[in-house]
Image: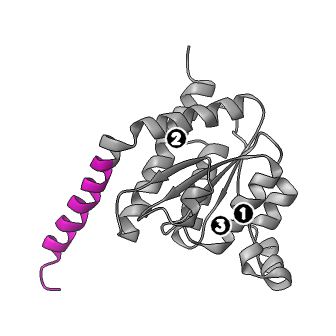
Amino acid sequence: MENYQIFIIDHLQNSAEVKQKIAENLVDDIARIAHILCTRLKAGNKILFCGNGGSAADAQHIAAELVVRLKSDFDRPAIPAISLTTNTSIVTAAANDFGFETVFSRQIEALANPGDVLIALSTSGNSQNVILALEQAKLKGIATIGLSGKEGGKMASLVDYSLIVPSDNTAYIQESHISIGHILCDIIEQELFGEE
C-alpha cells in the first residue's frame, strides 16, 4: 500500500457517509431509545450490555461511560450499568460448564430484574450467545435494544427496539455503534443530572 493517504481518506469518508445515513434515517429511533433508557433509569433500574469481540469492547466502553462519566467536566452520581463481557471467571465458567453460547444468558438470569434494559451489540445480529441473552431477557421481563448492522440478522426480530446501522462493513458498523453509545450517554447524563 504505497499511498496510505488515499486509503485513510477513503476510510474516513466512507465512515462519515454511514453516520450521515444514520443522521438522515435513525434519529427518531435513537431519541426513542434514549427516552426509554432515561425513563427506566429514573425508575431505579439498570442497563446491561453484551457483545462479542469489538462489540464486547464497545459494551464495556459504554457501560464505563455511564458508571464513571462521559464528560470529564461534568460531576454527577454513578449510573447503574453492567457489561456482561468483563467478568472472566463467570464467562469462562459458563463457557466451560454450559457452552459459550450461555455466557450472557446465565448472567441475565442471575442479575437482571424486571424494568432493566439489555443493550445487545452484534455487527451481524446473529451471534448465538447474544440471541440466547435476548431470549433470557424476555423471560426476565426486561426491555431489549439491539445495535446491529448489515440486515440486522436474527436479533432484529427478537428485540423490542432495533437500530440497524446501514452498512455491511464491520468497522463502520462498530464505529457507528460507539457514536450512538456516546450520544445515548450524553442524553442520559443531561436528562438525569443536567441543569433544569
> How far, Cα to Cα, is label 2 from label 1?
22 Å
Which is more foreground, mark 2 or mark 1?
A: 1
Quadrant assignment, res 91: bottom right
Reply above or below: 40 against 61. Answer: above
Helix or strand or loop: what does disc 3 sit on?
helix
Reply above or below: 24 against 109. Answer: above
What sort of colour scheme is used for the picture? one colour
Which is more foreground, mark 3 or mark 2?
A: 3
Quadrant assignment, res 94: bottom right
Circle 2 residue: 184
Q: Amino acid at mark 1?
A: Ala
- Residue 196 x/y as whole percent: 56, 13
- Residue 143 x/y as whole percent: 69, 45
Helix or strand or loop: what does disc 1 sit on?
helix
Helix or strand or loop: what does disc 2 sit on?
helix
Instruction: Based on the picture, tell me whether residue 7 belongs to the magenta stretch.
Output: yes
- Residue 145 x/y as whole percent: 60, 49
Whether residue 71 appears in this view of the structure is no
Instruction: Based on the picture, tell me whether residue 62 belongs to the magenta stretch.
Output: no
Label disc, if present, on residue 98 of the rendered structure:
none
Dots 3, 1 in contact, CB < 8 A: yes
Residue 118 shown left or right of residue 59 in the figure: right
- Which region shows up in magenta? 1-21
Judge the density around disc 2: few (<14), some (14-19), many (≥20) Cα neighbours within 10 Å: many
Label disc, if present, on residue 130 of the rendered structure:
3
Circle 1 residue: 133
